[in-house]
């Protein structure tokens, strides 16, 4: 899953997820999953130069390094200025970008050969040491980001992280453009999972891994190798870029790009008057936006989903593992009752203009690994079933006030956290609270109000004891490997769920099958079907809906490629008249 694995949203995933930009994907269908708006018709022509404004509805943090960023807010900024060794084609398969690669016979050594002539924005050449440097930053004992999983497979990375070694044994720079990596064991999706985005060693100098996220080199004057370079940053509000004339593919068609943060409630008006050219439209305004005469509307099934996390513990940094020490939701009948109480389809229709559908596992339908719904519990809306499960679990209204007490007869209520990310955010939250109230579960907004984007995720990541349930989302990579989010050792396992069977299946899913004649994809499908059944039954989170992304693209802009992971091919964006 996207370790680019962004917290999304909302998305929500990044993902970055986008996810994100640094991990891979597979899709065996051969279906073209990208949609391209060329902005052309019989009466338009492509114009050289010009600027395009890309909009987003949440303030960005400004951590402009792929190794350290956390959310889609910063991923949006990074996508214009930097890129990695790996890209993805329309079938969502990994393909060479800044590098090509080869494996040895037993798949334990991969050799990356970088393209010659790629330059950083300051004119310095991209070298193999920049890729080596990125791996060292992430494996550094002082690194506080969440991407160690993307280097943990490198031989010696864990020892270096633990302070038991001065170097990472498995990394060997062969020459200026070649680096060899030895991994601890072969995996079917190594190219999807290994960190593949370089960092400018010459530019960061002696700044420690711990200090880099707050350095001027990352916050004020970031550089990359992408088609546009940063010229101005207004923290949390706007970033301006100019064309990178030394871009390795050749200069982009635009003179520049503006990344602009807008008030989500004003999105339709800003799109209509041309202040925003490209934006993933707020779903609650899509009915109005898609009818605007100056845009080309594009919708696409997304590699993302929203969920309600059920907090069952905390992440212990010292041991590097989840600790399940919150017994409040330990009875899975309570967790299951909470989802039966929700009419998710009614929610989607009311608040997202029908963009999406209920989901019951961590893979959206666009993923080749998604299990068929006939093999799992779809948790269709059934408030009577919810009441029955709560009764069975001993949660009953013993004092006649309309709300249930716990099995010990004590008042039972649930804190719920959600973001103030759209006009309808309050109504959305109340829909969930009222739905639970209708089956006798008292629930309230944690702290009495919605939280802004950054406070929301900061509170959850800090394991604030007041957090009990929360509405979040993930953007995923195209490869279905759940590690990075679902292992008990993952910092981004935000629901703090530890299950040994789950851990074992996740690890099994990236191993080669014992039968060398067995198709790898079919083998992985079998493993992930078993894992999805487990998660669907245990329900550590309530899978809410899988997303259909809606994009508004001004008719004056062409070349914008929309994929399940976001927008792409920024070097090809252009103005049409």
Image: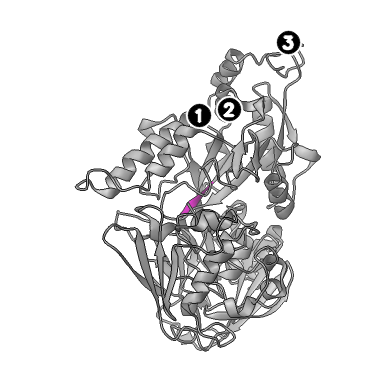
At numbered mark 1, what does the secondary structure look like: helix, strand or loop? helix
On the question of residue 549 being in view, the answer is no
Q: Is residue 219 left or right of residue 378?
A: right
Q: Which residue is mark 1?
A: 538
Per the model, the C-alpha gap separating discs 3 and 2 is 21 Å
State the extent of the magenta-drawn residues as a range.
301-305
At numbered mark 2, what does the secondary structure look like: helix, strand or loop? helix
Q: Is residue 394 above or below residue 297?
A: above
Q: Which residue is mark 3?
A: 398
Query: Which mark's residue is nearer the viewer, 2 or 1?
Result: 1
Q: x%, y% of residue 420?
A: 72, 50
Query: Which mark's residue is nearer the viewer, 1 or 3?
Result: 1
Q: Which residue appears at 46% of the width and 65% of the height? A: 562
Q: Which mark is residue 335?
A: 2
- Mark 3: few, some, or many residues within 10 Å (few <14, many ≥20)? some
| Marks 2,1: beta carbons within 8 A | yes
Q: x%, y% of residue 447?
A: 80, 39
Q: Is residue 282 left or right of residue 463?
A: left
- Mark 2: few, some, or many residues within 10 Å (few <14, many ≥20)? many
Between 455 and 396, the one nearer to me in the picture: 455
N-terminal of the pair, mark 3 or mark 2, is 2
| Residue at the extreme left of the image, as rendered | 517
Q: Which mark is residue 84?
A: none
N-terminal of the pair, mark 1 or mark 3, is 3
On the question of residue 155 being in view, the answer is yes
Per the model, the C-alpha gap separating discs 1 and 3 is 28 Å
Q: x%, y% of residue 60?
A: 68, 63
Q: Is residue 77 above or below residue 71?
A: below
């Amino acid at each position: 899953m996207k370790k680019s694995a962004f917290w999304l949203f909302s998305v929500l995933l990044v993902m970055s997820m986008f996810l994100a930009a640094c991990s891979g994907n597979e899709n065996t269908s051969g279906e073209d999953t990208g949609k391209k708006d060329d902005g052309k018709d019989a009466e338009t022509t492509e114009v050289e130069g010009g600027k395009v404004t890309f909009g987003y509805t949440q303030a960005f943090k400004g951590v402009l390094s792929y190794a350290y960023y956390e959310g889609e807010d910063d991923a949006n900024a990074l996508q214009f200025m930097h890129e990695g060794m790996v890209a993805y084609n329309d079938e969502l398969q990994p393909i060479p970008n800044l590098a090509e690669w080869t494996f040895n016979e037993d798949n334990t050594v991969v050799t990356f050969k970088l393209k010659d002539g790629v330059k950083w924005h300051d004119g310095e050449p991209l070298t193999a040491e920049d890729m080596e440097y990125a791996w060292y930053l992430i494996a550094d004992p002082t690194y506080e980001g969440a991407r160690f999983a993307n280097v943990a497979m490198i031989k010696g990375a864990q020892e270096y992280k633990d302070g038991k070694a001065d170097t990472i044994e498995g990394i060997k720079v062969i020459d200026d453009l070649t680096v060899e990596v030895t991994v601890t064991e072969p995996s079917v999706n190594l190219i999807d999972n290994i960190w593949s985005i370089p960092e400018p060693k010459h530019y960061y100098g002696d700044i420690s891994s711990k200090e880099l996220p707050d350095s001027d080199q990352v916050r004020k004057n970031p550089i990359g190798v992408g088609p546009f370079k940063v010229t101005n940053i207004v923290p949390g509000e706007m970033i301006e870029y100019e064309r990178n004339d030394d871009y390795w593919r050749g200069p982009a068609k635009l003179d520049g790009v503006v990344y602009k943060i807008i008030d989500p409630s004003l999105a339709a008006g800003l799109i209509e008057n041309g202040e925003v050219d490209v934006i993933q439209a707020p779903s609650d305004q899509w009915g109005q936006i898609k009818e605007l005469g100056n845009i080309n509307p594009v919708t696409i099934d997304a590699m993302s989903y929203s969920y309600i996390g059920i907090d069952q513990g905390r992440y212990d940094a010292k041991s590097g593992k989840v600790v399940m020490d919150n017994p409040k939701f330990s009875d899975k009948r309570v967790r299951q009752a909470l989802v039966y109480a929700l009419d998710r389809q009614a929610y989607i229709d009311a608040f997202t203009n029908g963009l999406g559908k209920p989901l019951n596992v961590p893979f959206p339908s666009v993923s080749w690994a998604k299990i068929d719904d006939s093999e799992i519990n779809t948790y269709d809306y059934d408030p009577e079933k919810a009441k029955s499960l709560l009764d069975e679990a001993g949660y009953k209204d013993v004092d006649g006030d309309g709300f249930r007490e716990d099995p010990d007869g004590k008042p039972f209520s649930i804190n719920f956290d959600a973001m103030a990310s759209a006009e309808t955010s309050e109504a959305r939250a109340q829909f969930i609270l009222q739905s639970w109230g209708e089956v006798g579960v008292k629930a309230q907004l944690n702290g009495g109000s919605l939280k802004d984007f950054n406070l929301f995720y900061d509170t959850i990541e800090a394991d604030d004891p007041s957090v009990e349930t929360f509405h979040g989302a993930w953007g995923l990579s195209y490869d279905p490997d759940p590690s990075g989010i679902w292992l008990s050792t993952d910092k981004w396992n935000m629901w703090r769920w530890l299950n040994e069977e789950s851990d074992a299946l996740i690890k099994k899913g990236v191993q080669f099958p014992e039968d060398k004649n067995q198709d790898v994809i079919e083998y992985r499908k079998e493993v992930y079907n078993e894992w999805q059944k487990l998660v669907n039954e245990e329900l550590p989170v309530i899978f809410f809906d899988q997303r259909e992304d809606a994009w508004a693209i001004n008719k004056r802009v062409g070349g914008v490629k929309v994929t399940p992971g976001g927008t792409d091919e920024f070097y090809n964006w252009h103005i049409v008249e």
